Amino acid sequence: MKILTGNDLKSGAVIWWDGQGWSLHVNDAVDVADAGATLIAREEAAQNVFAAYVVDGAKDADGVRPAHIKERIRALGPTVRPDLTLKPADPAAVNWVI
Amino acid sequence: MYKYDNYDQQMVDTRVEEFRDQVRRRLTGELSEEQFRPLRLQNGLYLQLHAYMLRVAVPYGTLSSAQMRLLGDIADKYDRGYGHFTTRQNIQYNWIKLEETPDLLADLAKVEMHAIQTSGNCIRNISSDQYAGAAADEIIDPRPYAELLRQWSSFHPEFLTLPRKFKICVIASETDRAAMRLHDIGIKMVRNAAGEIGAQFYVGGGMGRTPMIGPMIREFVPLDQLITYSEACLRVYNRYGRRDNKYKARIKILVHELGKEEYTRQVEEEFAHLMTQGIEPPIAELERIKIYFVDPAYDTAASDELDLSDPDFRLWVERNTEGHKQAGYVIATVSLKPVGGIPGDASADQIRLMADLARDYSFDELRVTHAQNIVFPHVRKADLYTVWQALDAADLGTPNLDTIGDIIACPGLDYCSLANARSIPVAQKISERFAAKQEEIGEMKLKISGCINACGHHHAGHIGILGVDRKGKENYQLLLGGSEGADTSLGQITGPGFDEDGIVNAVEKATEVYLDKREQGERFLDTYRRIGMAPFKEALYG
């Protein structure tokens, strides 16, 4: 699947296109197929996101997972500070990255 | 330390308000990201892997306690409770919000700090010896010259759009503690046969994807020609440095391609021309700056006695303190490398504690080191136990300076959008694996970079580790034999890379070869230089 990501303008936070708007959680990401460029143009013009781009991902029983390790770290947060990730209560969250 | 005059303060305050307006226009959509990006970068604001990152300049690594305290407060107020001290003697915050950045910069300006020229193709923050002004072996305090160069290079209209970023280092000791020859310009303050102080110029050093050791191009530049000669070096680079390929745009490539002799000839020619232009600031300006760097009011009756009956304190003193030029004082280094910790990170509370200790016990001064530690430059021996107890209680008393646990590591793929592999987890695993063996191994400079840009100085590590991306997986190359000191050398790659656990095992094998082969008094580096790569390769791949 193709998933669309970018950054929130005010906070810089990593966000994912969920089909209706932007979510902090990669698990909300939807397959944008070949609509990425159109969505990027529209959403960046509306200031809803910046630095947007499309990445490869896959959906399995655990949810949506970007294909490349860099995008997985970007989606979760730093693997060396679990307290700062999107899953601070999950001690095994780093395994999702690796 | 240097204090802003009205001109300095006005310059920084004006820049804050200019950026405040630029941020406002970005948030309202008047500026696109394409338009805004160079503006935010000129103010040290990057977009990193998770958020905006702000890099704050710490000129030649020197901080007052008030500045340090504010850095701690900023970590709480604008970030997530911590900061990261970098290999450029700066501090970075990883979770900055764009809308809050102007207020953050305004807070910094109140203590004479900023983030200007911490990014972009300009002259970056000037680095120096962290023991400047305190070291027993220096011929003079290098910081007034670094400050003069800072003033010259700040907003220098000719050098704001160089072919590539430009880093200058100034030292004044025979012992190079600042990796001087791995800078675009390395300046060593020296004394000539007549006893006069001047500057020795090394140009074209650097790390990155093409590491080079800067050759000396001028043995002695008189003090009243320091800026003019620097300007000549920059002008030749600005004129002929490559702009067609960013990977070949650093001055080291120009010096290498022209050859040291031809580059030097062109610099001397430009220098002769510039000498007719009267661009050198009056020597009185240097004298004005020097006043800010006079020695603090040492207690000349301070005792040289030190009670070392506490074995933990003794270990820390032996490992983390250095002789001072003033009797009764020491230079104390605070390791930001607790066992299993994140190199260079400090919490807001730790930063404020170090600020308080510097205020009370180090004449209000601290230094950031390029090895990502903090220095109290002037601690009375009589106060040292009190300082250590406070540090130890805050997890800042790790006795591991210059050992295998004192690892330089870039933020790597955990934070950096340029990285290919994580650096910090490797550092943590090595730190834990070798915690009990660090004393046996002795002096060891281990440096880890998460990509070829080499922010973790892996080329200059006795053991260097370079993280790469191998078909979407992290892979780590091992280098041996690098050094950044007076005996500067570049590490050599051992062979095929390793995975994360494999690189930790590889480091262990390399240290075992050293422990097996070393002769009396040899450091790892000495043994490597004596026996060469072959025994290490045999242990690693045989």
Image (tube, rainbow, N blue to C red):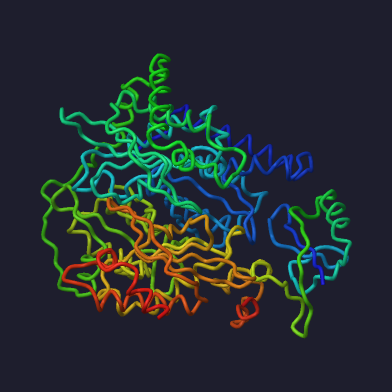
Where, quadrant-wise, is the C terminus of chain B in this rendering?
Answer: bottom left
Furthest residue toward top: B276
**Residue B179, image x and y in percent?**
35, 50
Instruction: Give percent across and percent down for residue B11.
Output: 52, 30
Above or below residue A12? Residue B514 is below
The quadrant of the picture occupied by the N terminus of chain B is: top left
Tell me which residue sits at (27%, 69%) in the image: B531
Would you say B354 lies left or right of A67 here?
A: left
Note whether B91 is above or below A77 in the view shown.
Answer: above
Residue B528 in the image: x percent, y percent?
Answer: 29, 67
Residue drawn at (36%, 37%), measured in percent from left and top?
B146
Which sits in the foreground, B493 or B147? Answer: B493
Q: Which residue lies furthest to the bottom in this view?
A: A61
Above-or-below relation of A61 to B103: below
Camera sees residue B542: yes
Let me know if residue B63 appears in the view. no
Q: Position of residue B417 (x, y in %)?
A: 62, 59
Residue B287 relative to residue B429: left or right: left
Q: Which residue is drawn at 62% across and 76% down?
A: A88
Q: Quadrant of residue A11?
A: bottom right
**What count of labels does the image hold?**
0
Name the foreground residue: B251 vs B166. Answer: B251
